[in-house]
């Protein structure tokens, strides 16, 4: 490349400045979402019925106290290291390997996969809302593959070592193929991927439901689900309590994938093609990138990551496929947007959102605020991250110089060529 | 705009409509032929369903939320703001309409207005409020329209079940016990088959008025001209002294108003809001987007496409009641979604307004 060192260092400075700004915006967005969420909690506390008011403001009693809600949420997600009501601050009986923390890390692990899935497509300039559907079908493929292959394998650790990687691979393959469909539709028929992936989500949920209820249903169960896998064929909890459904192995796998995706995007020529076709499609075409193929491949990759998320959900959490798959794919959108599409940013973003999700159970139990609150926060976070101009105006009013760079559907980092006009 | 581009536009518009009409006629004659030749087959059952009056009336009912959302989407996108949050507007208005009716009490009237109609307007107001937030975020704060629209959807998808749980303890609301009911026009409603047009819920009549009215506003008024210019060539609009931002606000708010009618009609037609999974809206907002793309941003075409999707849904529901075919319901339910994808793939290269999705800076500081 003919670009001199001087130009490179300028670029690097730009990237760094933008990273700092992105982190600031993400935190500001999170803060704003939490504030608006608190207002919503407060208002709904007027509507809900309760014996005694939890909080009193302006002479009005409210059923829910927002500050308490967030304290309970945070404390619950960590498994109660603090004593919120008692005089001593710290809970002497707190054990880091607890149930609450296991729940948090379980959610974090799953969100790393779905977050990566959305991020890969995002970097290629594609908005994959279909991670949910890819996850549902990937999960089903994993569950069915593991169920039918398990009898031919020796029970025990050896069998698990063969079965689990293969089952994850099958999940990735099916998720990837399902993701490639909207990719191909986008590349060759110009069909907007936002709409097609959303439609494919509906189709995936229905088809998976029919397949299980008609053909692969567990005959001993009242709900629509497949027959549970043997314990040796699943990812069992290490160190953490059994009920938390969290395996350190899966988290390690997720972190390894984060590094792998980062390497693929930033250090390989395929990653370069993918990013340029997302940031500057015309330039990519001009540089000899087959944009159509890149679109299909990146959607396959994105779907495969979603499929792996589904595989981990089956192998680590459920031990089977069950109708009513949680909306991990949609949460992945929030995680990615919060992370500014950066693979390494996905880890803290997933941890944050995992904390919200697992803490919401403690909130429902402890304060009566429905756990659906997380669904509201999910949307609010996206809304606030989407409007950096808002924070820029606040920033400029307190004299904080910031850069011009929004999370956008053109692949996120439009640093090199300025804004698209 | 030169005359050649206008001609081209007319051509594409015409070919889409002809494609739609020809396709529909072909499918219908196919079914009619086999249905008449083999009276005992599935085709005969299908034919029976297609020409039954109750299918028409349920297709009209099901078309209401899709059509209104699609009309709203046209105004927003023509003005230059892609509103992908239509689904969220439908969800929030559907929920607000029911909860307001329930809180007031179904039998109560306020200023002579029955509670259910107060609820109806409250739903429209909620949708308007959401679209105002969306407009401010997109126009004032220059957010990416797709992401902001997605946020509107996800916020509504979270908020409605959350609020329902606060009030009712579950994600579904209770049934309020009344619905919007039907307005029957004497004599005309006795016409076979087409009588369904004159024996329908109030929202169906509103839809039949709103479609031509939207077409008229968009194509025959100064306001409509501003809307179209704001999406095609905002600079020109600015040059002649029209505030582009204001026109865009109007377009987005109109999308909120129209979607609100669709959402309120959807839930109040049933008397209940269902909030599990994707809620009772279940993708209708996204189907609406495809409907107006298929209709090439023409309100009449968008209605045609919405009616097609709704008709598929109506046939699908009736097909579930026909005994003897071992097709699982869930599989039949995917038909409308698959059709949407196929149609989007066929008409994918629609000509979206030139400046849609882009921010417009007036050059001066934003007020």
Image (cartoon, coloured by chain):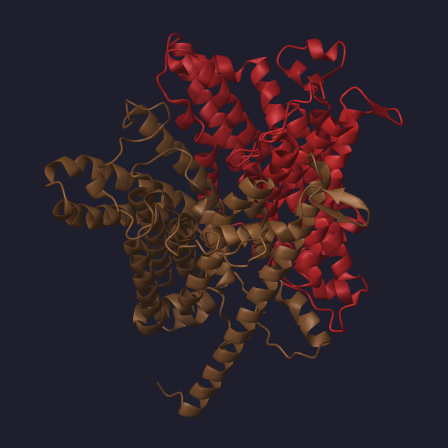
> Residue placed at 48% from the left, 52% from the top?
A80
Instruction: Using residue A246 as the reference point, say whether residue B6 is left or right of it.
Output: right
Q: Position of residue B269 (x, y in %)?
A: 66, 24
A301 and B38: which is toward the camera: A301
Left or right? Give the position of B123 relative to B19.
Answer: right
Picture coordinates of residue A186 (x, y %)? 42, 52
- Residue A398 makes an appearance in the image: yes
Q: Residue at x 66, y 46 (%)?
A: A41
Residue B80 x/y as whole percent? 66, 56
Q: Quadrant of the N terminus of chain B?
A: bottom right
Q: Colour of chain A?
A: brown
Query: What chain is colored red?
Result: B
Vertical placement of residue B284 versus A363, above or below:
above
Can residue B302 be seen here? The reply is no
Q: Is residue B247 above or below residue A244?
A: below
Quarter of the figure with the C terminus of chain B: bottom right
At x 49% / y 17%, what residue is drawn?
A: B318
Q: Is B66 on the left-hand or right-hand side of A75?
A: right
């Amino acid at each position: 490349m003919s670009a001199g060192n001087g130009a490179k260092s300028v670029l690097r400075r730009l990237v760094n400045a933008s990273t700092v700004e992105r982190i600031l915006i993400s935190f500001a967005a999170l803060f704003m979402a939490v504030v608006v969420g608190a207002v919503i909690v407060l208002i709904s506390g007027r509507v809900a019925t309760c014996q005694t008011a939890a909080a009193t403001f302006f002479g009005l009693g409210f059923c829910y106290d927002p500050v308490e809600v967030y304290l309970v949420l945070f404390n619950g997600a960590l498994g109660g290291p603090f004593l919120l009501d008692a005089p001593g601050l710290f809970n002497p009986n707190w054990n880091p390997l607890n149930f609450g923390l296991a729940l948090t890390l379980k959610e974090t692990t799953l969100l790393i996969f779905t977050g990566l899935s959305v991020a890969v497509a995002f970097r290629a300039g594609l908005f994959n809302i279909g991670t949910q559907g890819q996850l549902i079908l990937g999960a089903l493929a994993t569950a069915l593959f593991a169920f039918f292959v398990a009898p031919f394998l020796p029970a025990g650790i050896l069998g698990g070592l063969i079965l689990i990687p293969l089952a994850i691979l099958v999940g990735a393959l099916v998720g990837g193929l399902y993701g490639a469909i909207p990719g191909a539709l986008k590349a060759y028929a110009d069909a907007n991927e936002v709409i097609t992936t959303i439609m494919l989500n509906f189709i995936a949920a229905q088809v998976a439901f029919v397949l299980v209820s008609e053909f692969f249903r567990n005959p001993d169960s009242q709900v629509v689900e497949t027959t549970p896998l043997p314990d040796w064929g699943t990812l069992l909890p290490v160190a953490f309590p059994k009920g938390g459904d969290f395996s350190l192995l899966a988290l390690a796998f997720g972190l390894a994938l984060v590094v792998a995706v980062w390497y693929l995007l930033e250090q390989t020529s395929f990653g370069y093609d993918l990013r340029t076709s997302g940031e500057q499609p015309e330039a990519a075409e001009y540089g000899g990138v087959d944009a159509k193929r890149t679109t299909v491949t990146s959607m396959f990759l994105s779907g495969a990551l979603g499929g792996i998320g589904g595989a981990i959900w089956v192998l680590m959490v459920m031990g089977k496929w069950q109708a009513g798959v949680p909306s991990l794919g949609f949460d992945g959108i929030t995680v990615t947007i919060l992370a500014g599409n950066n693979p390494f940013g996905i880890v803290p973003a997933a941890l944050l959102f995992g904390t919200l999700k697992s803490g919401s159970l403690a909130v429902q139990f402890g304060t009566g605020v429905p756990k659906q609150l997380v669904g509201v926060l999910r949307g609010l976070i996206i809304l606030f991250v989407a409007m950096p101009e808002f924070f820029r105006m606040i920033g400029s009013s307190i004299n904080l110089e910031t850069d011009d760079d929004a999370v956008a559907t053109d692949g996120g980092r439009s640093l090199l060529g300025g804004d698209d006009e | 705009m030169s005359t050649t581009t206008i001609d081209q536009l007319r051509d594409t518009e015409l070919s889409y409509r002809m494609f739609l009409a020809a396709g529909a006629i072909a499918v219908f004659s196919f079914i009619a032929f086999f249905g008449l030749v083999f009276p005992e087959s599935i085709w005969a059952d299908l034919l029976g369903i297609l020409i039954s009056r109750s299918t028409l009336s349920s297709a009209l009912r099901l078309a209401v939320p899709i059509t209104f959302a699609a009309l709203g989407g046209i105004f927003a996108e023509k003005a230059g703001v892609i509103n992908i949050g239509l689904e969220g507007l439908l969800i929030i208005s559907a929920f607000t309409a029911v909860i307001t009716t329930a809180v007031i009490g179904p039998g109560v009237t306020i200023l002579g207005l029955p509670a259910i109609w107060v609820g109806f307007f409250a739903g429209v107001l909620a949708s308007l409020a959401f679209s105002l937030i969306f407009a401010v975020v997109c126009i004032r704060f220059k957010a990416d329209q797709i992401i902001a629209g997605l946020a509107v959807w996800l916020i509504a998808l979270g908020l409605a079940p959350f609020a329902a749980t606060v009030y009712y303890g579950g994600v579904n609301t209770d049934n309020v016990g009344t619905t919007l009911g039907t307005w029957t026009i004497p004599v005309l409603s006795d016409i076979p088959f087409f009588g369904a047009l004159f024996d329908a819920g109030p929202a169906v009549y509103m839809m039949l008025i709103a479609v031509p009215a939207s077409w008229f506003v968009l194509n025959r008024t100064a306001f409509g001209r501003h809307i179209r210019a704001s999406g095609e060539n905002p600079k020109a609009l600015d040059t002649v002294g029209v505030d582009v931002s204001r026109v865009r606000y109007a377009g987005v708010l109109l999308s909120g108003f129209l979607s609100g009618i669709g959402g309120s009609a959807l839930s109040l037609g049933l008397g209940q809001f269902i909030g599990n999974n994707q809620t009772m809206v279940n993708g209708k907002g996204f189907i609406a987007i495809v409907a107006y793309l298929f209709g090439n941003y023409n309100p009449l075409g968008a209605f045609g496409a919405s009616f097609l999707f709704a008709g598929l849904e109506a046939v699908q529901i009736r097909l579930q009641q026909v005994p003897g075919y071992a097709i699982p319901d869930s599989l039949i339910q995917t038909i409308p979604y698959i059709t949407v994808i196929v149609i989007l793939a066929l008409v994918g290269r629609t000509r979206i307004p030139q400046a849609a999705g882009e921010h417009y800076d007036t050059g001066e500081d934003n007020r």
